[in-house]
Image (tube, rainbow, N blue to C red):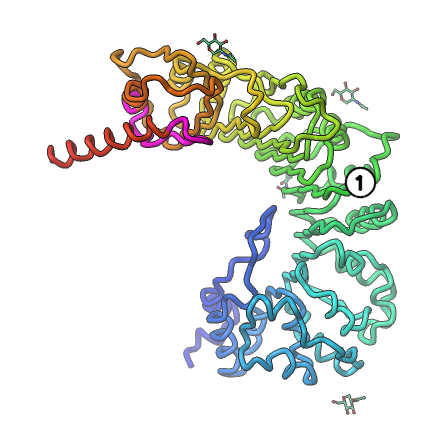
């Protein structure tokens, strides 16, 4: 064997190339990406083969092999009694159904002390543990006190299993750490950098909120955190964490206990770049937090509440504009997709854009509202585009086309487009009652716009589809189709298609 391979760093470097599984924290952040367990079977078997090759390969290959674990089956598979049960299908790559039914665990006796040692054989190698989709039955097989993952950096779980993370006494009776007492788990929690607690609706009581908040306050190296709503003390703790870059609050649709407004203070989250709130049943709590916080490094802001009152929505836009992120914020997504039983059906439209003009670095703005809806006209659009020179995606979507109070004119649209040369995706409401652009006028071409969705508020048939198609293809040469709900644009799109084909023919003929 070449001498170079005796240097552990060199070996690790080489093995790292084999290990091309994307780490959980890049695919799981805020995401709904489902990683198929053992999907990277090829990588796994290569690493396993390397581990068996010779003594010096063993440790580094095994470390990589066990870096990231999904579910508890791989650990349980180390127990001699359970191995044939788990892998009896004759394949180590179970299908989704097999994986989640965990039928093999039916009636299986819990692990003995000896078997617990087998279960933990590789636990110290694990850096990412994803037990979000684990079948609850598996937890009955494992004694409650055996979760020892000293090198764990990322933990992904869901609220039904929250107790695994919360309980202080998990390790008290553990055979391997009898002397470490109840603090041992806490000590380990300090090293956690990525914690994702998916809210699966079992997050019920105030006591769990306060337990979770307490536990999170012991994590002092968090980089990404996704969890249900926290108490104010924990907000304060997080605001002082210089490591924290991404924060997501996933409240679920249950009623969670309110923040105590007692000692709300001005908080400054110096390093947070991404802030996301989803699954909120209403926005009041979070608006309070934003009103009292500064996010001077914020680049991404997402907010999804089931519904917002007009007044709340205006408060939210205002609070956002005051949180010191004017020079940094690049992406804003706010949606409120529900009708809302208690929201009056025709509440005042909201006017977010004037509040958001201060975000000069804005690249993406997505506002999806059902009710209240968003007011937009030519002047506001023009102001927006002159304030956001870097904008690439503008998506002001009405989820209900029945009560649209406003829309820009075609002329207003083209005037605004000339100010944002990088825009490639645009979705807005348009008022086509009159076509106020002369089809024969000299166009100012916009060559970045590719995706155009226009919802026509006049709801009438487009009178002269051919002329409109001619205008669009002249001004927006890269748009070959106008997307929309319904069939309003079908006729125009037909003309656009034939003119695109004609242009292609012409270009082909010329060259
Ligand atoms: C536990 O394992 C040891 C060594 O492998 C063995 O000697 C002992 O009998 C086992 N105990 C039980 C209860 O199986
Ligand atoms: C967090 O912000 C502080 C002050 O702005 C800075 O010194 C530090 O390097 C940042 N930490 C990280 C992890 O980005
Ligand atoms: C928070 O800061 C703002 C301005 O920076 C100030 O007007 C307000 O009174 C402060 N609130 C508290 C509770 O300190
Ligand atoms: C649509 O435009 C026409 C004029 O072109 C105007 O009279 C009408 O009020 C507009 N509709 C709305 C809802 O703004």
- Label 1 CB, ligand 3: below 8 Å? no
Q: Indicate whether residue 119 is drawn in magenta.
A: no
**Helix, strand or loop: magenta stretch:** loop
Q: Which of the pair 108/487 is nearer the observer?
A: 487
- Asked if residue 328 shows in the view, the reply is no
What residue is at 51 percent from the left and 62 percent from the top? 21
* Circle 1: element type: loop
Could you tell me how many numbered marks the image carries?
1
Residue 93 location, x and y as percent?
Answer: 54, 73
Q: Is residue 254 above or below residue 481?
A: below
Outermost residue toward the left? 510
Q: Quadrant of the N terminus?
A: bottom left
Rendered location of residue 189, percent (x, y): 75, 57
Residue displayed at 53% across by 78% down: 91
**Of 389 and 286, the residue lying toward us:** 286
Q: State yes or no: residue 476 in magenta.
A: yes
Q: In the figure, residue 2 lies in which quadrant?
A: bottom left
Residue stretch rendered in magenta on the structure? 473-489
Q: Which residue is mark 1?
A: 255
Indicate the position of residue 371 as horizontal and vertical percent values.
Answer: 64, 25
Along the horizontal axis of the image, is 27 left or right of 259? left
**Lateral position of residue 394 relative to residue 318, left or right:** left
Q: Position of residue 479 (x, y in %)?
A: 33, 30
Indicate the quadrant where residue 432 lies. top left
> In the rendered image of this protein, does residue 213 appear above or below residue 270?
below
Say which of 314 and 439 sits in front: 439
């Amino acid at each position: 064997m070449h001498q170079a391979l005796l240097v552990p760093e060199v070996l690790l470097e080489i093995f790292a190339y084999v290990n091309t599984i994307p780490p959980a924290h890049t695919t799981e952040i805020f995401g709904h990406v489902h990683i198929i367990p053992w999907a990277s079977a090829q990588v796994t078997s290569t690493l396993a083969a390397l581990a068996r090759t010779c003594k010096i390969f063993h440790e580094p290959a095994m470390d990589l092999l066990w870096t990231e674990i999904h579910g508890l089956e791989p650990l349980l598979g180390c127990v001699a009694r359970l191995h044939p049960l788990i892998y009896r299908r004759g394949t180590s790559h179970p299908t989704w159904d097999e994986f989640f039914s965990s039928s093999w665990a039916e009636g299986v006796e819990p692990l003995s002390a000896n078997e617990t040692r087998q279960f933990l054989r590789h636990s110290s190698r694990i850096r990412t543990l994803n037990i979000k989709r684990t079948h609850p039955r598996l937890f009955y097989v494992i004694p409650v006190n055996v979760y020892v993952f000293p090198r764990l950096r990322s933990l992904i779980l869901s609220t039904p299993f929250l107790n695994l993370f919360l309980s202080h006494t998990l390790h008290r009776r553990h055979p391997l750490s009898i002397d470490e007492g109840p603090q041992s788990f806490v000590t380990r929690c300090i090293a956690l950098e990525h914690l994702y607690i998916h809210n699966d609706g079992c997050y019920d009581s105030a006591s769990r909120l306060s337990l979770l908040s307490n536990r999170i306050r012991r994590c002092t190296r968090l980089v990404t955190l996704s969890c249900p709503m926290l108490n104010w003390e924990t907000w304060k703790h997080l605001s002082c964490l210089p490591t924290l870059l991404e924060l997501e609050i996933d409240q679920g649709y249950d009623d969670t206990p309110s923040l105590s407004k007692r000692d709300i203070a001005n908080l400054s989250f110096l390093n947070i770049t991404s802030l996301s709130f989803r699954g909120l049943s209403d926005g009041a709590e979070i608006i309070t937090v934003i009103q009292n916080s500064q996010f001077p490094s914020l680049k991404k802001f997402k907010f999804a509440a089931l519904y917002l009152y007009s007044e709340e929505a205006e408060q939210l836009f205002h609070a956002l504009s005051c949180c010191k992120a004017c020079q940094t914020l690049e992406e804003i997504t706010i949606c409120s997709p529900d009708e809302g039983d208690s929201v009056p059906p025709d509440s005042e439209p909201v006017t977010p854009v004037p509040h958001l003009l201060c975000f000069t670095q804005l690249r993406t703005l997505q506002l999806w509202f059902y009710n209240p809806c968003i007011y937009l006209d030519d002047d506001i659009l023009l102001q927006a585009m002159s304030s956001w020179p870097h904008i690439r995606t503008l998506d002001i979507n009405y989820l209900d086309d029945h009560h649209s109070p406003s829309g820009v004119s075609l002329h207003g649209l083209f005037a605004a487009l000339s100010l944002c040369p990088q825009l490639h995706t645009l979705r807005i409401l348009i008022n086509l009652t009159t076509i106020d652009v002369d089809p024969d006028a000299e166009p100012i071409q916009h060559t970045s716009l590719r995706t155009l969705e226009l919802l026509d508020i006049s709801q009438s048939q487009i009178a002269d589809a051919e002329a409109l198609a001619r205008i669009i293809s002249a001004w927006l040469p890269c748009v070959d189709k106008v997307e929309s709900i319904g069939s309003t644009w079908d006729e125009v799109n037909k003309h656009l298609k034939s003119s695109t084909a004609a242009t292609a023919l012409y270009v082909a003929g010329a060259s």
